[in-house]
Amino acid sequence: MARSIQPVSVLDDILVSKRNEVTMLHRPEVRDLLRSEALAAPATRDFAGALRTGTGTIAVLAEIKRRSPSKGDLAPDLDPGATAAAYAAGGAAGLSVLTDGPYFGGSVHDLHAARAACTLPVLRKDFVIDEDQVFETRALGADAMLLIVAAVPDDTVLSDLHALAVDLGLAVLVEVHDAAELDRALAVGARVVGVNARDLGTFAEDLGTGERLVATIPTDVLAVAESAIRCRDDAARMGEAGFDAVLVGEMLVKSPDPTSLVRDLASVARRAR
């Protein structure tokens, strides 16, 4: 009997590319340098604390994003420093900076420029699958790290990556897409959980995913709604569902006035879970 072949997803493609990148970090001289710089890095800014607004409104995690696999170029020529300053002026709680180059057009230079331009905590948004990437993230000066559950199928590896990041002083935004992934995130001790409305296999979007899952996130764990926030009403929908924060990228980088847009989003009320 012929065996069916599963189609390769966008995430699968990205992870193949990422595994190739990681081999560069495994070179002894590179690995030693990253670990030395990570251990000597100054204190991080309080990412989780920044997402607790204490005002009854949602926190805005504003993203610096040049392109995406599904939409192509969004803002290829953006100035990361000026964009970060504009977000901060609008009342963003923190920044999310894409550092993946092949698929999102990002770089570590974007992270450095954004963090230098303001005092907001910065999330490095990339596809972390290896401990050397955790040391790299800390060495680069990020305050928080994205850890995508779907990208790390082994529970022991997931737990080890999370624990290493925390030991190094990083906050960790653990991203999930369904109930099974949420269970895995909570099992490793996640304190900040992001629910991504975008299926990383097909890139289809559904805000209902967050509405279904947020009620099962413990109240002492920060809940962040990720992707598909296209307008203020979408943010309000997530606030009403009980999310503490929204991560917004495409809408902001395409806006002619990101400061006003962040300010508008940051006024959205949130319902306590």
Image (cartoon, helix red, strand yellow):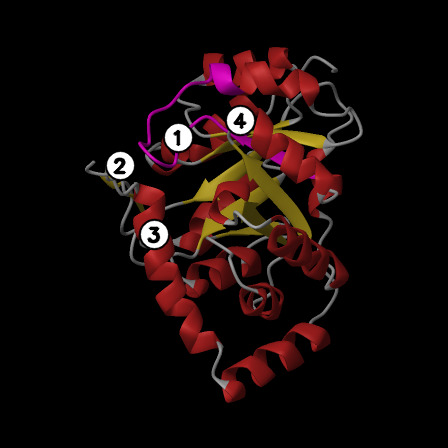
Q: Is residue 35 left or right of residue 9?
A: right
Q: Report the disc number at residue 199.
A: 1
Which badge, 4 or 1, is on the more N-terminal residue? Answer: 4
- Distance of label 1 from label 2 (alpha carbons): 11 Å
For the point 60% across and 20% down, the residue is: 213
Residue under label 2: 70
Which amino acid type is shown beneath numbered disc 2? Answer: Ser
Cβ–Cβ under 8 Å for marks 4 and 1: no
- For label 2, the SS is loop
For the point 75% across and 43% down, the residue is: 189
Q: Is residue 250 left or right of residue 232?
A: left
Whether residue 257 appears in this view of the structure is yes
255 is higher (above) or lower (below) than 22: above
Neighbour class for label 3 at 10 Å: few (<14), some, many (≥20)?
Answer: some
Residue 119 position within the rendered picture, expressed as x and y whole percent measured from the top left:
64, 52
Nearer to us: label 4 or label 2: 4
Q: Magenta residues: mostly which secondary structure?
A: loop
For the point 39% across and 30% down, the residue is: 199
Q: Quadrant of the C terminus?
A: top right
Q: Report the disc number at residue 14.
A: 3
Nearer to us: label 1 or label 2: 1
The magenta-colored residue range is 192-209
Residue under label 4: 178
Which amino acid type is shown beneath numbered disc 1? Answer: Asp
54 is higher (above) or lower (below) than 34: above
Which amino acid type is shown beneath numbered disc 3? Answer: Ile
Which amino acid type is shown beneath numbered disc 4? Answer: Asp
Which badge, 2 or 3, is on the more N-terminal residue? Answer: 3
